[in-house]
Image: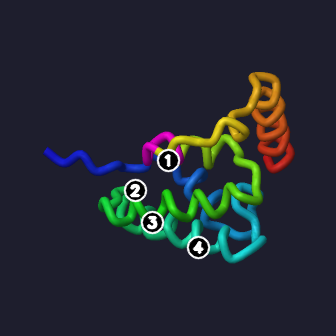
Amino acid sequence: MNNLPVIVLTDTEWMDLIDKEREALPVCCANLSSLRDCIVKAARNGGRMSHFDVQQMHEKLDWYLEGHSINSLLRKVCEQVNYELPVENNPTEDQLMDEFYAAAEKREKEN
């Protein structure tokens, strides 16, 4: 039995993380670029990751979270690769709802 993590996202969610023009992981710094590389590799493998890939992603997340906040999509990825977020990155329910409504408004404007 294979206990390796599989990241399960919709096509739109994958693109939100991979496309530098979208807001989920915008162009910012080398840490973010390195994290995006891990996500691209997972996407190319159908979301499947080796133990080494998971280690690499955890390391990149550590670097990324030193200077950035986390959005709900990246939080979803963290949960699927068993990455434990630092307490300061755990949002309140109000923050989650604000992010949810902002994303819904954005999708509505795009359609």
Q: CA distance from mark 1 to mark 2?
A: 8 Å
- Of the two numbered discs 4 and 3 on the same chain, state the one appearing first in sequence: 4
**Front of the two marks 2 and 4:** 4
- Camera-nearest label, 3 or 2: 3
Quadrant assignment for the N terminus:
top left
Q: Which residue is mark 2?
A: 47
Instruction: Identify the image quadrant of residue 50.
Output: bottom left
In the structure shown, which secondary structural element does the residue marked by tag 1 occupy? loop
- Of marks 3 and 1, the one in the foreground: 3
Instruction: Say if 42 sits above or below 100 in the image.
Output: below
Amino acid of disc 1: Leu
In this view, the residue farthest toward the top is 93
Q: Are marks 1 and 2 in contact (CB under 8 Å)?
A: yes
Q: Which residue is mark 4?
A: 34
**Local crowd at mark 1 within 10 Å, few (<14), some, or many (≥20)?**
some
Expressed as whole percent of the image width and height from the top left, the position of residue 78 reads 53, 46
Q: CA distance from mark 3 to mark 2?
A: 15 Å
Location of residue 87 in the rendering, given as x and y in whole percent from the top left corner: 66, 36
